[in-house]
Image: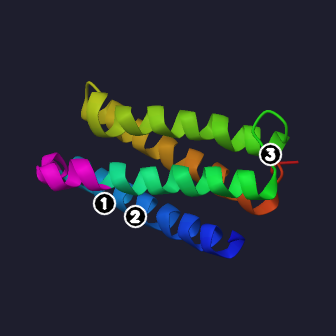
Amino acid sequence: MYMILKHLHLAAVTLSISLFLLRGYWMLIGSGWQNRRLMRVIPHLVDTVLLLSATGLALTLQQYPFVNDWLSAKLLALVAYIVLGIIALKRGRSKTSRTLAFGAALVTFGYIAWVAVTRDPTPWH
């Protein structure tokens, strides 16, 4: 079961960041594609699979946020990533603020991926 959840989670991560990059690119060039119904629905479906597979992995491995420091860091960084993504793709008042939020979201995603691989919440030391 672990391997199925892990591969499902990794596939969802890959699809989720790919869709975020695509939607961010469309935002940067001023395309209306990111506002199409399909592109507003698919990322939510992918992110639901991502969240469910992450929950399944945590339960299977018996590693929990606020118990395991690396998982806590990932969860808090995920919240920051979501907020930055909302600013980048929807709520940013100017293209500059959306662009800055998009870049910050990508850096945050990099941190999340690094912590996931190393299981170390402070990869800079």
- Label drawn at residue 22: 1
Question: The residue tagged with tag 1: helix, strand or loop?
Answer: helix
Q: Earlier in the sequence, mark 3 or mark 2?
A: 2
Q: Residues within 10 Å of mark 3 (few under 14, many from 20)?
A: many
User: Is the Cβ of the residue at disc 1 closer than 8 Å to that at disc 2?
Assistant: yes
Q: Quadrant of residue 121?
A: top right
User: Disc 2 marks which amino acid?
Assistant: Ser
The residues bearing labels 1 and 3 have C-alpha atoms spaced at a distance of 29 Å
Left or right: 119 with respect to 11?
right
Q: Residues within 10 Å of mark 2 (few under 14, many from 20)?
A: few
The residues bearing labels 3 and 2 have C-alpha atoms spaced at a distance of 24 Å
Estimate the x, y position of residue 113 in percent, counting from the top left: 65, 57
The structure residue drawn at horizontal position 11% and vertical position 49%, both measured from the top left corner, is: 32
Q: Quadrant of the N terminus?
A: bottom right
The structure residue drawn at horizontal position 81% and vertical position 60%, both measured from the top left corner, is: 118
The structure residue drawn at horizontal position 41% and vertical position 43%, both measured from the top left corner, is: 102
Question: The residue tagged with tag 3: helix, strand or loop?
Answer: helix
Left or right: 23 with respect to 57?
left
Residues rendered magenta in the picture = 30-42
Q: How many marks?
A: 3
- Label drawn at residue 18: 2
Disc 3 target residue: 70
User: Disc 3 marks which amino acid?
Assistant: Trp
In front here: 25 or 11?
A: 11
In front here: 77 or 26?
A: 77
